[in-house]
Amino acid sequence: MRILVIEDEKKVARFLRQGLEEERYAVEIASDGERGEALASAEGYDLIILDVLLPKKDGFEVLRSLRAKSVKTPILMLTAKSSTEDKVHGLDTGADDYLAKPFAFSELLARVRSLLRRGASEKSTVLTLADLQLDTVTHKATRSGKGIDLTGKEYALLEYFMRNADRVLTRTILSEHIWNYNFDTGTNIVDVYINHLRSKIDDGFDKKLLHTIRGVGYALKESAQA
């Protein structure tokens, strides 16, 4: 599942990314309100963690704007403003939950799981392509009923492919969404992980699902045709 963290404090943002990625969530960071709102409006995230005190546009403004645009993604407000009035204001504006700093990561994680379950109840939690299935709650992958052991990055990569089945994904897109940095033409990290993932989901099966589109990128689909 994909989580957008809108947080301008670099140490907090790094802490959240590391902890959430260890739990096999794909995490993207926005360091100001305007960038966060743009990402939240255009991308399909499963959860947004939103700070209040942000540069360019504060969290309450971002929250109000997203709800006005009918963005229904669950939003967890994470802020040092812990007064009852602030919590009520956040919840009334459209937040789904409110957690004050400082916080225990275990509590944040429990709230994240709760919000994700709530959102998942409105849609299927199992992604399917041919005989390949991925449960976005348990993070378990199977093909023809056989379990597939995935690392955190492999899981994030497979989930992104399955949410974009039949779409050609360039190395740049994969780098930005899975590794959260601009694509460096001097690195082959995307290709390395693609090869690892392909060996796990395609080896031993007659029908190959993960295809290389020469000169463009990769696609997860049943047909080998571009």
Image (cartoon, helix red, strand yellow):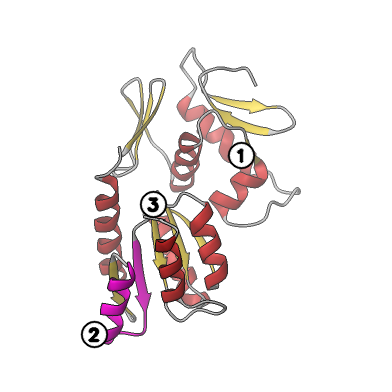
Dot 3 falls on a residue whose secondary structure is: loop
Look at the picture and state if 116 lies above or below 161: below
Residue that mark 1 sits on: 192
Query: Position of 213 compared to 148: left or right?
Result: right
- On residue 46, the disc is 3
Check residue 113 for magenta coloring.
no
Inspect this view and state whether residue 131 appears.
yes
- The residue closer to the viewer here, 114 or 147, is 114
In reply to whether residue 80 is colored magenta, the answer given is yes
Three-letter code for the amino acid on which mark 3 is drawn: Asp
Q: Is residue 214 left or right of residue 56?
A: right
Which mark lies nearer to you, 1 or 3?
3
Identify the image quadrant of residue 212: top right
In the rendered structure, which disc, 2 or 1, sits on the residue that comes first in sequence?
Answer: 2
Estimate the spatial distance between the alpha carbons at disc 2 and disc 3, rounded to whole Å.
27 Å
Image quarter where the C terminus lies is top right
Residue at 51% over, 28% down: 199
**Which of pointers 1 and 3 lies earlier in the amino acid sequence?**
3
Q: Is residue 27 above or below residue 206?
A: below
Q: Amino acid at mark 2?
A: Thr
Q: Which residue is mark 2?
A: 84
Mark 2 vs 3, N-terminal side? 3
Residue 31 is situated, as x and y percent measured from the top left of the image, at 55, 71
Q: Nearer the viewer, residue 197 or 127?
A: 127
Q: Is residue 127 above or below residue 83?
A: above
Tell me which segment is drawn in magenta. 75-94
Q: Position of residue 49 (x, y in %)?
A: 40, 66
